[in-house]
Amino acid sequence: MGTRPCAGVASAVAAAVAVLLLAVSCFAAAATTTQKHGSMSGKGGDVLEDDPTGKLKVFVYEMPRKYNLNLLAKDSRCLQHMFAAEIFMHQFLLSSPVRTLDPEEADWFYTPAYTTCDLTPQGFPLPFRAPRIMRSAVRYVAATWPYWNRTDGADHFFLAPHDFGACFHYQEERAIERGILPVLRRATLVQTFGQRHHPCLQPGSITVPPYADPRKMEAHRISPATPRSIFVYFRGLFYDMGNDPEGGYYARGARASVWENFKDNPLFDISTEHPATYYEDMQRAIFCLCPLGWAPWSPRLVEAVVFGCIPVIIADDIVLPFADAIPWGEISVFVAEEDVPRLDTILASVPLDEVIRKQRLLASPAMKQAVLFHQPARPGDAFHQILNGLARKLPHPKGVFLEPGEKGIDWDQGLENDLKPW
């Protein structure tokens, strides 16, 4: 009786993986040593290490405490969740050399409103409060200073780290229904959400990584010479029965497909359990799955880069953080959502020299620095990448300033619930 074709494929994949695991383990220490004291070379490295100081000036509006500090005092969980970049960006700018106290010389204006810091008991941002907070903050700025009204916010930037950015909702259908908050449609949005051809990503936005605690990750580092004995690693939800009881909508079915196809595959270390050794396990893995969830992005991408685990990005049309600086195509593997059932074959087919090259690039300190919001800030970190992104948008085009008589914001535009006072 002949061998079944699927069994033959599985055997070939297992054999290829065994060779890969052995080779990667042998090369791990050498690759780490090569990058230990070096900087990343080439276009990506040069851009990552740009210093934005002297290239732009930012005026930080002094807002009433109800828009930021009172929200933080009410719930300090805001400092730990993946949306925390909006808080740390405010703290960073207050002491940054790019800050100016003279608004007349500013290139950019920043409004510190903590829209993700009004939380449910479970710790998630309230989607109906966030747009009201932001609208109220913009109204205050427009009524207190003259700078918003001369451009309708075109020389202003806002942090919008919600699941779907300034559409302010965690469910895509509801986010699309709301659309980008009308008062922000001329502003530059700095947001974690990025997906091509999507109504919640407006042209000119700067896509940034989600917040992941740098100190917490540093505390879990293990020896870089540790063999990478795990082929594929993932921890997280495969289904969201609470919000998607019928299944198939969450992650557009991609996570469910990972589970159904590979839950019994010994090459795949995947589970919904989140062990205490999660960060250590990532440092023992060659590939770390970074599938979309409700939105295309997640902190796993940051964790994978920091721990040198090759990100396997499963999110069609995703716009990745600082894509003009970080060479994502060189450090990641992209798998189309429809190709998830072939994930084992795809990853086993990545040539060994390509795996080693990706790991060496991931070992670059500049690469890791660029996805982290350090406190205090460090050269080349995510704060500096945001400033570099803003600097590259200068000088502002002629159309930034409104002409005399040109119609400004329609303050009555938007969903009825969003127009309620906050």
Image (cartoon, rainbow, N blue to C red):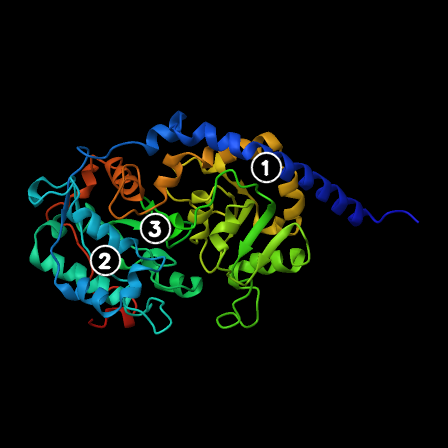
In percent of width and height, residue 100 lies at 10, 42
| Residue assigned mark 2 | 183
Left or right of 160 on screen, residue 282: right
Image: 267 above or below 294: above
Q: Is residue 416 visible?
A: no
Judging from the image, what secondary structure is the residue with disc 1 in?
Answer: helix
The span from disc 1 to disc 2 (Cα, nearest Å) is: 53 Å
Q: Do the numbered discs 3 and 2 sit on residues whose CB atoms are within 8 Å?
A: no
Residue 25 vs residue 179, the one in the foreground: 25
The vertical placement of 386 against 130, above or below, is above
Instruction: Kindly identify the amino acid type of the residue bearing the numbered disc 3.
Output: Arg
> Quick one: quadrant of the C terminus?
bottom left
Q: Secondary structure at mark 3?
A: helix
Report crowding for label 1: few under 14, some 14 to 19, many 20 or more residues within 10 A (C-alpha): some
Residue linked to disc 1: 25
The residue pinned by badge 3 equals 215
Earlier-in-chain disc, 3 versus 1: 1
- Looking at the image, can residue 331 be seen? yes
